[in-house]
Image: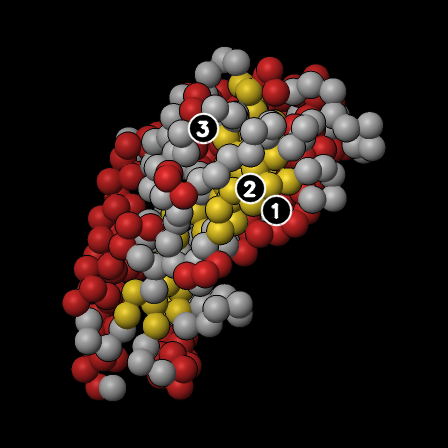
Amino acid sequence: MHRIYNFSAGPSMLPMEVLNRAAAEMCDYKGSGMSVMEMSHRSKVYDAIITDTEARLRSIMGIPENYEVLFLQGGASQQFAMVPLNLLKNGADYAVTGEFSGKAYKEAQKFGKVHLTATGEANHFTRIPSQDELVIAADSDYLHICANNTIYGTTWPYIPQVDIPVVADMSSCILSEPVDVSRYGMIYAGAQKNMAPAGLTVAIIRKDLITEPQPITPTMLNYGVHAKAKSMYNTPPCYQIYILGLVLEWLESIGGLTGIEKINRNKAGILYDYLDNSSYFTPIADKGSRSMMNVTFKAPTVEADEAFVKATAAAGFSNLKGHRAVGHMRASIYNAMPTEGVEKLVEFMKDFEKNA
């Protein structure tokens, strides 16, 4: 078997322990004679899987009882419409700090009055606006943020202090560190970074926010419908939920979110420490806004960027090319990326710099 160090921004690496467990149970899940891919979502054996997965997620994230946990589909992009359809009554505030928060802001404008709270466009999204820069409209129902910006390599270093519910897209940072769920009105995340294969979206929403949606809301985009049906209104993404359960078991085995945060901060520190002291490579995000999950950097020229990306691919490192919107390089070092992978990347970068 040949495994590479996959620095993809998503779909991303899964822990080897999870992949091996899934492989062992692929054809016969716990004596059922079926793969999880094959069984009815209404069966007792699958009910145990989805119930256990929700319980583990609640435990590991410390989700209060007054929050619903919904297993949905459509990715975070579907939430760009689903959030305003369900929560926007009078108006909403959006902070645009990157590509996906910008898309969420644009989509929300189709469904009501939306106010631009802050934007990082002037500084090319290299930093997160401070608390003092946030301007909240008087009649807003919620503030929407993207907690971690996959493309630009920035993250919110604080939770906005506002008098309205904060709705956070945590697709690329969920489960990477402890989070106080009670300080958010809603958290949502596509699973393909830190949770499971693509196809599952997790929504954690305070129950009192689940009210009558806008009249035009399709049934499948109604949080109340999914909450009442306990994520079983239609066939859920069964296998992805099963994999999420295995990922949560793996996280429990290494100390939960406190344990993985320690590992993640060490990995990011190794890479940022090298970049800060390199005379060849330059980190892109401002120090106070740097992501622990997505590290963006560049070489002296575009040609040097291209040469580096080509060399890394030949050396067994995958997906280090930056997003097409910004170019340069990006190393996505999610939970499943071992520390060894970051150490070997830094060794390679040192050699490349020496020979450049």
Which element is circle 3 on? loop
- The residue that appears at 34% across and 72% down in the rendered structure is 298
Measured as percent of width and height from the top left, residue 31 is found at: 57, 28
Judging by the rendered image, the residue that carries numbered circle 2 is 94
- Using the rendered image of the protein, determine whether residue 215 is visible from the camera's viewpoint: yes
- The residue that appears at 25% across and 86% down in the rendered structure is 356
Which element is circle 2 on? strand
Residue 301 in the figure: left or right of residue 119:
left
In-front residue for pair 243/209 = 209
Task: Give, as a three-letter code, the residue at label 2.
Answer: Tyr
Tally of numbered discs: 3
Residue 58 in the figure: left or right of residue 219:
left
Q: Given contact means CB atoms under 8 Å apart, are the residues at marks 1 and 2 in contact?
A: yes
Judging by the rendered image, the residue that carries numbered circle 1 is 105
Task: Give, as a three-letter code, the residue at label 3.
Answer: Val
Q: What's the distance in space between the residues labelled 1 and 2, CA to CA?
A: 6 Å
Residue 239 in the figure: left or right of residue 318:
right
Q: Quadrant of the N terminus?
A: bottom left
Judging by the rendered image, the residue that carries numbered circle 3 is 162
At label 3, counting other C-alpha atoms closer than 10 Å, the crowd grade (few under 14, some 14-19, many 20 or more) is few
Which element is circle 1 on? helix
Q: Earlier in the sequence, mark 2 or mark 3?
A: 2
Above or below residue 216? Residue 16 is below
